[in-house]
Image (cartoon, grey):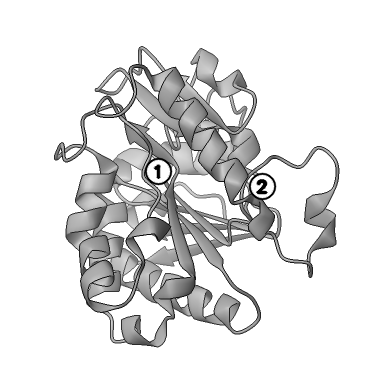
Amino acid sequence: MRLVVVHPDKEVLAQAAAARLLTRVLDVQSVRSPVHVVLTGGSVGIATLAAVAASPLVPAVDWSGVHLWWGDERFLPDGDPDRNETQAREALLDGLVAEHGLPAANVHPMPGPTSVATPEEGAAAYAELLREHAGDRPDDHPDEQSEGTVAVPAFDVLLLGMGPDGHVASLFPGHEVLAAQGTTTGVHASPKPPPERVSLTFDAIRSAREVWIIAAGAEKAEQVAAALADGPVSEVPAAGAVGQARTLWLLDAAASTTTPK
């Protein structure tokens, strides 16, 4: 199922996405544990995490049962201000660990050059970590254990931003990485700096129960419309980001101006 929700501006979009995310985590925790959420970077993605931090719903979540992952990461040293992880820690995660019982071990950043030599080594290490948690898939979804299922946890929500070129995670239009197999991939010659990255593949993204794409700004409207019209993934990678149960597009009014009615 695909659903498109439009908010008046990017500030309201971030606030609404934060409230929706916390509500979803609470709903999942009422029926199963652990909960696995994949985070995204970008201006709206980090604004959403900051809005989560300020929400009165934060104490209602049992953060000890939440695992946090990333859809992609810039291949930069630990603590670099341009890493998605660094920005997420400042906006939300450090506070959750210090004040709300999120175990530091439940935060799963993608490796960078501080610990591995190449994006491929980082991708392999992350794939192994994902595989270790693939057993978290609950018994109430036996179909997810079928042969051929990618070795990742049962992502309950996988957040993605979308670039003006239609890319999601670090899967760029026309790039060889679009055809990557397995669950993770190293990325070289990214058209958006820095050139080296680590990313989930489409196989991993499509394994998520729910994929949420958050996009704001008039510069993204054309690609939003193309993705919602099921344009070719080679040209509009966002069109290939779909969830098992639901694909949710969260937009501001500017990004939705050319969205088909």
Residue carrying label 2: 207
- Is 133 positioned to the left or the right of 114 in the image? right
Circle 2: element type = loop
Q: Quadrant of the C terminus?
A: bottom right
Q: Amino acid at mark 1?
A: Ala
Mark 1 and mark 2 lie on one chain; the one further toward the N terminus is 2
Residue carrying label 1: 221
Label 2: how many residues lie within 10 Å, few (<14), some (14-19) or many (20+)?
Answer: many
The reply to whether residue 48 is visible in this rendering is yes
Q: Position of residue 24 (x, y in %)?
A: 52, 74
Q: Position of residue 80 (x, y in %)?
A: 15, 36
Determine the image quadrant of residue 84.
Answer: top left
Label 1: how many residues lie within 10 Å, few (<14), some (14-19) or many (20+)?
Answer: many
- Is 178 positioned to the left or the right of 223 in the image? right
Q: Which mark is residue 178?
A: none
Q: Position of residue 23 (x, y in %)?
A: 47, 79
Circle 1: element type = helix
Location of residue 210 with respect to 66 vertically, above or below: above
Q: Position of residue 179 (x, y in %)?
A: 61, 20
Between residue 124 and residue 74, name the one nearer to us: 124
Q: Amino acid at mark 2?
A: Ser
Q: CA distance from mark 1 to mark 2?
A: 26 Å
